Amino acid sequence: MREYVTDDIIYALATPWAQSALAVIRVSGEGCKALLATRFSRPKSLKEAGNATLVHGYLQDEAGKKIDEVVAAVYTEGHGYTLEEALEFSCHGSLAVIKEILSLFSQLGMRSAEGGEFTFRAFLHGRLDLTQAEAVQELVVSQSERSRALALGRLEGSLKERISSLKQQLMQIMAAVEVQLDYAEDELDEFVFPRTQLVDLIAQLHHLSETYQVGKLYKSGARIVLAGSTNAGKSSLFNLLLKQERSIVSPINGTTRDYIEADLSIEGIPIRLYDTAGLRESSDSVEREGIKRTERLIGQADLVVFLVDSTLMGHVPEEDERTLVVYNKSDLAKPPKGKLAISAQSGEGVDRLLHEISTRLTSGFSVSADELLIIESERQYQLLNASEEALGRALALVDEDIPLDITAVELGEALDNLGQLTGEVTPSDILETIFSGFCVGK
Ligand SMILES: Nc1nc2c(c(=O)[nH]1)N(C=O)[C@@H](CNc1ccc(C(=O)N[C@@H](CCC(=O)O)C(=O)O)cc1)CN2
Ligand SMILES: Nc1nc2c(ncn2[C@@H]2O[C@H](COP(=O)(O)OP(=O)(O)OP(=O)(O)O)[C@@H](O)[C@H]2O)c(=O)[nH]1
Ligand SMILES: [Mg+2]
């Protein structure tokens, strides 16, 4: 993998490659103001502009031909997102304009940025630690109100602060051990290992790493399959949830053949929802293939919403943690008492169903889904686990009265893992992997 060079001038389109009202092209690196002043209609204004100022003018080519009328936002060194001297050009969002400006920038000898390179520089110059840098991308890709709010919290440093507190506690334990190792035993009062603190620290680490279950759900979402006999109302419910007539609804049994999928969000959880072919014995080979696919989807689902037609009842499967039985057509027939009932026609009971779905998906978590600090990065999860495991080993060593210097090694490893989390001791190839997953221009 290519190492990021960090002392040159980089540029990138920060908005989509598409026609729009405005487009933003950002530039970062020492000397970018003076360099771009050579292609700006008001070179002196740009060169001398102070931090956080806007300069209006034209970008023009070497021959002085105007490319576009733009507004340049100016950041001086020590300011702005990257903490480097930087510029942002807001131009007209035409593909022709964007192409010409990018080609102008390339001719000037600046380098087109790799994914995540602006954020990498922000990290390098200390604006963000690694948990905050990861939160930037998590914020960019967040799709629900909740994952947005959680990512913003991490960007503001909620996770960084929590890790810092955990590190502080660990270092206190390590300091006590060091004192004991550094001085001969007879110089000290009898040493008591701070066992309670260590046990407590392990519990805190465990709690934080367990929030990944929730984070993963809000980030990657869940697959929900609507299943049931033909005519139970699966397609009607599918359309109702999507607020759109996506799937064909008809009183004919076996209307849906191939499954249909769509995305929605239920109480902040991203959901991929499947409408499937109704289950019944069929002599039609096409329908049988559809039913086979339904069965395959059921096998892969995080949750199966099994619809039962209350007017017919028919086959009702066992409820389990992956299967939610729902009685439809409550407007026509009374469903059994105490069971979840809806009318996909009138919408009655659907809010309760949505809430039940969200409860099901978050049940079994050892931390509350309402937790304010939640991690969603697998990297962070693994480092927290590694740290927790090292502390677990340290505790076992203490309890077996093994010499303290061996315990100290485990404590050191736990600290090292926390350091990798925030990026103090993260090898450069790992950093590259993290940042290269970001959007270009971020
Ligand atoms: N135009 C623009 N919008 C953006 C960004 C950006 O880089 N440019 N961001 C990035 O992707 C995010 C915001 N991040 C930023 C962080 C710090 C500063 C900044 O200039 N900080 C000032 C101090 C500000 C203050 O005092 O409140 C500084 O360092 O002097 C700017 C943007 C989202 N919106
Ligand atoms: N009265 C009433 N009719 C409903 C309700 N839900 C669905 N229906 C009707 O039941 C019939 C079957 O509905 P669909 O949504 O096509 O059923 P399905 O489960 O997708 O059926 P297949 O695709 O054949 O498996 C249609 O005529 C719907 O209008 C309901 O809650 N109340
Ligand atoms: Mg259907």
Image (tube, rainbow, N blue to C red):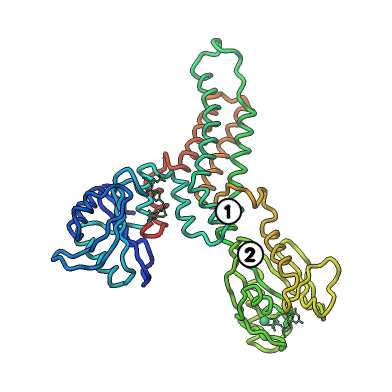
Residue 164, placed above or below residue 284: above
Three-letter code for the amino acid on which mark 2 is drawn? Ile
Residue at 57% x, 39% y: name it.
388
Q: Is mark 2 within 8 Å of ligand 2?
A: no
Three-letter code for the amino acid on which mark 1 is drawn? Gly
Residue at 59% x, 13% y: name it.
189
Q: Quick one: which residue is furthest to the top in this view?
A: 186
Residue identifier under label 2: 266
**As rendered, which of 324 and 24 lies closer to the eye?**
24
| Image coords of residue 162 (percent x, y) | 54, 40
Q: Name the element at disc 1.
A: helix
Which of the 4 image quadrants contains residue 396? Answer: top right
- Taking 346 as reference, is 202 left or right? left
Q: Residues within 10 Å of mark 1 (few under 14, many from 20)?
A: many
Q: Quick one: which residue is furthest to the left in this view?
A: 63
Q: Which of the two discs, 2 and 1, labels the residue nearer the N terminus? A: 1
Residue 183, placed above or below residue 147: above
Residue identifier under label 1: 215
| Image coords of residue 262 (percent x, y) | 58, 73
**Quarter that holds the C terminus:** bottom left
